[in-house]
Amino acid sequence: MASYETALAHIDQPRQKKNAKIELRELKGLGALTLRLDSRDAQLTSACAKAGHPLPERLMTRGAINDTLACWISPDEFLLLFANANRRDSAYSALCKALTGSYFALVDNSGAYVYLLLSGKERLMALRKLCSYNLEGNFPPGKLVATLLAKAPIMLVDLNDSQVLLIARNSFADYIYRALTHAMEEFI
């Protein structure tokens, strides 16, 4: 599978100050597969689990960004993120084998998204400035939300108590990155 340059390759990402309350950085080299299937079918979800890729429940994620992270996008769509291309390729093979004979779609979307990691204690304050979704009390660790950020579509994943993963389509990456860096200024 091909290698690619991210949509933010042209931006010199600023160095973060040592005592900053917030940090934004791009996660490069992640692999991504979009899996579409009927998640109500226990045989299909069981086959995914046996292949080493259990699927999460509604609006949640399963796994970790430094290994494999499975994200629920809709009742029949999941985004599987991998720490590197080798894991993505082996997952692709394993899932195709496990789901053979079933109705499903599995597509490599590694080049379709930009992944930003927003971390620090003021991360939600910066997001609140731009986000149409009410994050207050509605965004526990592990939850995925598809929403708008500064009028651009985005997926937010609360990874833990100090990090949020932002998944943006390439076409909105530059706009979202610049809006976030502007919203973060008071916390740096």
Image (tube, helix red, strand yellow):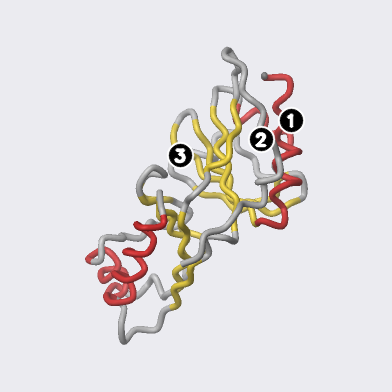
The residue at 32%/71% (across/down) is 93
The residue at 41%/75% (across/down) is 38
The residue at 63%/24% (across/down) is 15
What's the mark number on residue 183?
A: 1
Q: Earlier in the sequence, mark 2 or mark 3?
A: 2
Distance (Cα) linking label 2 and label 1? 8 Å
Question: Which one is closest to the eye, mark 2 or mark 1?
Answer: 1
Return the residue nearer the eye: 182 or 43.
182
Q: Earlier in the sequence, mark 3 or mark 1?
A: 3
What's the mark number on residue 127?
A: 2
What's the mark number on residue 159?
A: 3
Q: Residue 21 at what x, y percent from top left?
A: 59, 18
Tell me whether the residue at label 2 lies in contact with that at label 1, contact meaning CB atoms closer than 8 angstroms: yes
Disc 1 packing (10 Å; few <14; some 14–19; many ≥20): some
Q: Residue 86 at what x, y percent from top left?
A: 36, 58
Return the residue nearer the eye: 158 or 58.
158
Distance (Cα) linking label 3 and label 1? 20 Å
The residue type indicated by label 3 comes to Leu
Whether residue 138 sits left or right of residue 33 in the image: it is right
Distance (Cα) linking label 2 and label 3? 15 Å
Classify mark 3: helix, strand or loop.
strand
The residue type indicated by label 2 comes to Leu
Whether residue 114 sits left or right of residue 3 in the image: it is right
Q: Residue 106 at what x, y percent from top left?
A: 44, 73
